[in-house]
Amino acid sequence: MKINISQEGNKKETGKIQEEKVENVVGVSDSELRQDIVTGDWVVIAVGRAKRPEDFSKVEYSTHNLSDDIADCLFCDPVKSGQEKDVLIYSKNDGDWTLRIFPNKYPAFSRGKVPRPLEEGPYFAMTGTGYHEVIVTKDHFRHLPDLDIMEIAEVFDSFQDRYLSLMKKKSVNYITIFHNFGKEAGASISHPHSQLMAIPVISPYIKQELDGAELYFKSMRRCVYCEMMEYESENKKRVILKPLFFFYCCYTKLSFFNVVFILNV
């Protein structure tokens, strides 16, 4: 899936979770999903994304050194900076928050019930209906690699929580979660955060993976991912971490540091 810039609930508690109900809004979308009629790939045209703030526009930051100036950080205090209403908050027993999720203020997709088809000549498109959320951890100076195990587990718990909440929405057929680390990776805000996009279309690449896994099972009567995990576990030269989460360097990597992550159950 490419993004081009031409540019629910009840309160819970724990180390705990508070969840606020967000109205499902249908309105005019600022973005479009356009399909390449040759490759079948989908491209997001999100003009509104060009309005987002840019922490990195005036000063060059290394991906390993975040800004020391947190006075004007939009994510250190999302309520004060006027971010959208939280859909999920994780907090400590003393009430101080550790992680919060809220709709992106400059979304690539607009929340709605069903996408509306758009046509122009031989081309096909649809309104950019879906969900675009930001997952923010509180500490301004600690990225995912700097968190301890329980803090990382909380981040992944939040991913799962939102995935389960959004997967049954009428406008959602695919959910992707990503974390841009620094300007070079595409981040516009220096405060550590991940993003979630829940959209009505499935990337041809993902469909190709699903079809390939099904074809392998039909021909070999074995799960292709179980097969790869077993071999890599015995071979050991590409394994990074196991046992619960199985990380290993991809044998057919498309780029440097291409790592496969599989839940080992």
Image (spheres, grey):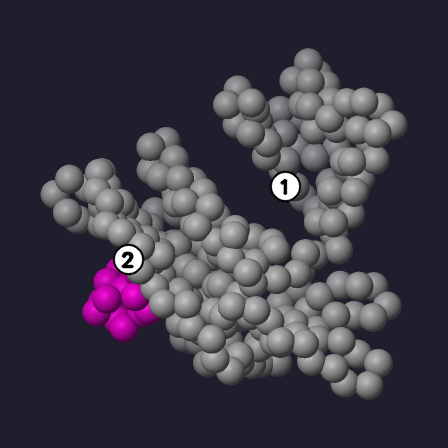
| Disc ID at residue 257 | 1
Q: Which residue is rendered at x = 84% and y = 81% of the image? A: 122
Callout 2: helix, strand or loop?
loop
Q: Which residue is mark 2?
A: 20
Q: Is residue 107 left or right of residue 154?
A: right
Q: Is residue 186 magenta?
A: no
The span from disc 1 to disc 2 (Cα, nearest Å) is 38 Å
Q: Where residue 168 sits in the image (x, y, percent)?
A: 52, 52
Rendered position, 156 above or below 41: above
Q: Where residue 4 sits in the image (x, y, percent)?
A: 63, 72
Q: Which residue is rendered at x = 22% and y = 38% of the image? A: 15
Q: Is residue 165 left or right of residue 231?
A: left
Which badge, 1 or 2, is on the more N-terminal residue? Answer: 2
Q: Which residue is rendered at x = 80% and y = 63% of the image? A: 40
Q: Which residue is rendered at x = 43% and y = 61% of the image? A: 133
- Circle 2 crowding by C-alpha within 10 Å: few under 14, some 14–19, many from 20: some
Q: Where residue 199 sits in the image (x, y, percent)?
A: 58, 61
The residue range painted magenta reads: 70-86
Task: Give, as a three-letter code, the residue at label 1.
Answer: Phe
